[in-house]
Image (tube, rainbow, N blue to C red):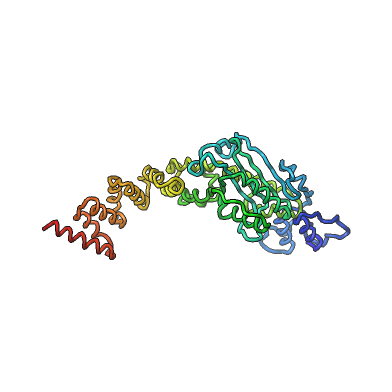
Amino acid sequence: MGLHDRLNTLRRQAGSEPPAPGRASTESSPIAPGSGNVLDEIRARLDRMGVAGTGRTRAKTPSRRKAVSPEALANRLGGERLAEHVIEIDRVIPDDHAHGRYALSMARASASPFWSPAPRVGFIDTETTGLAGGAGTVAFLVGLATLEGGRVRLRQWLMTAFAGEGALLAAVDAALDECDHLVSYNGKTFDLPLLRDRRRMQRRPDVPETAHTDFLHPVRSLFGHAWPDCRLRTVEERLLALDRQDDLPGSEAPWAWKAYLASGRSDELERVIQHNTDDILSLTLLGPVLARVLEDPLSHKGSIEGAARLVERLDGKDAARRILEVGEESLSPRGKLWLAREWRRTQRFDRAVPIWEALAEEGHQEALEALAKYHEHQRGDWDRALHYAEQLPRAPEAQVRLKRLRERVRADNR
């Protein structure tokens, strides 16, 4: 690409139209500017250079496609120009819209304990120019769904040039102001910090913090032990039975947007919009679906202990104990010790002691120590307490306990 074409590309990215073409020739350029996907152009250049590994000995130059203006793109997406370089797409998704095994009406079901019915919940996802973050990463597409009148309203804001970032952030922030609780997937680590940093780059004020449910963490607690990974795509396949057809991977989104800036080609960018839509619709269903998993983790092949840890944070110790109690037979030794501690906390030694005794036979030190304390302090049975204390390592505290118990046993035997 010659200097003339590079300057035109930079003008488009900044939101300015390049000057009308003059007599300058581009015949010396190996690939005609705006001829197609950026990745294809790079591959074609490598082919022409004779670089191995591109899969072809000689690439055919992609045919030129007509550039799509922002006005035409807005019409194709069913949106409108919110500002010079920002398109807004605002729609209500029908209740009977199928998303995997569920209709979208499922989004109205209870999502307790993740959130109560009262808060105004917003489901947010971004598409960015890079997946690693950093000062140069920009959110070129932001989607936000809300439940209004029990129906899913989805708004998406798309930048058509870097110059539109300020207007996009202003629109997103106004919509976020309507939400009391945000829901995302990895949003605590990526999406929200990125939007915060971009506000500061644009010298915009921070938005007030709200309650936030990031479903990546509940999914890891429940299924991290069993699934190959906890990507949203895996969650959709396993919990929603969603098989995305012709989905553009999120990793391709930066290429699609940059290709539009460089050449006006919108085909792949329109697929990014659909990818973002599917991500957000999945978020609207995950609350009710994961709430059902918490009611019966075993039937969903979820971790009982992971469910209990999650519920303890959201709903307290008693709710966590009930989950452990129901799944006691499937608990690991750590989980059984946790359940025994909960029974001890509520003074239900009749439930705690059998757990300790079973684990003590396997040599678990916490169970041995708990039984030594129980028989000493609750039963006053020095012989039994000494029996368990003698099986513990000879730490200083254990030595003190042994001395005390032996003295009491001798006193009783006099």
Q: In the rendering, at what x and y percent does residue 406 appear?
A: 18, 60
Q: In the rendering, at what x and y percent does residue 168 appear?
A: 69, 50
Q: Nearer the viewer, residue 300 or 11?
A: 11
Quadrant in the rendering for residue 149: top right
**Quadrant where the N terminus lies?**
bottom right
Kindly identify the residue that appears in the image at 24 percent across and 56 percent down.
388
- In the orientation shown, which residue stands out farthest toward the right? 23
Q: In the rendering, at what x and y percent does residue 298 appear?
A: 42, 43
Kindly identify the residue that appears in the image at 25 percent across and 55 percent down.
372
Mark count: 0
Q: Nearer the viewer, residue 343 or 250?
A: 343
Q: Nearer the viewer, residue 27 or 391?
A: 391
Q: Nearer the viewer, residue 398 or 1?
A: 398
71 sits to left or right of 140: right
Quadrant in the rendering for residue 57: bottom right
Decide if residue 303 is in sight here. no
Kindly identify the residue that appears in the image at 27 percent across and 60 percent down.
392
259 sits to left or right of 95: right
In this view, 146 is above or below 20: above
- In the orientation shown, which residue stands out farthest toward the left? 414
**Quadrant where the C terminus lies?**
bottom left
Decide if residue 202 is in sight here. yes
Q: In the rendering, at what x and y percent does residue 259 appear?
A: 72, 54
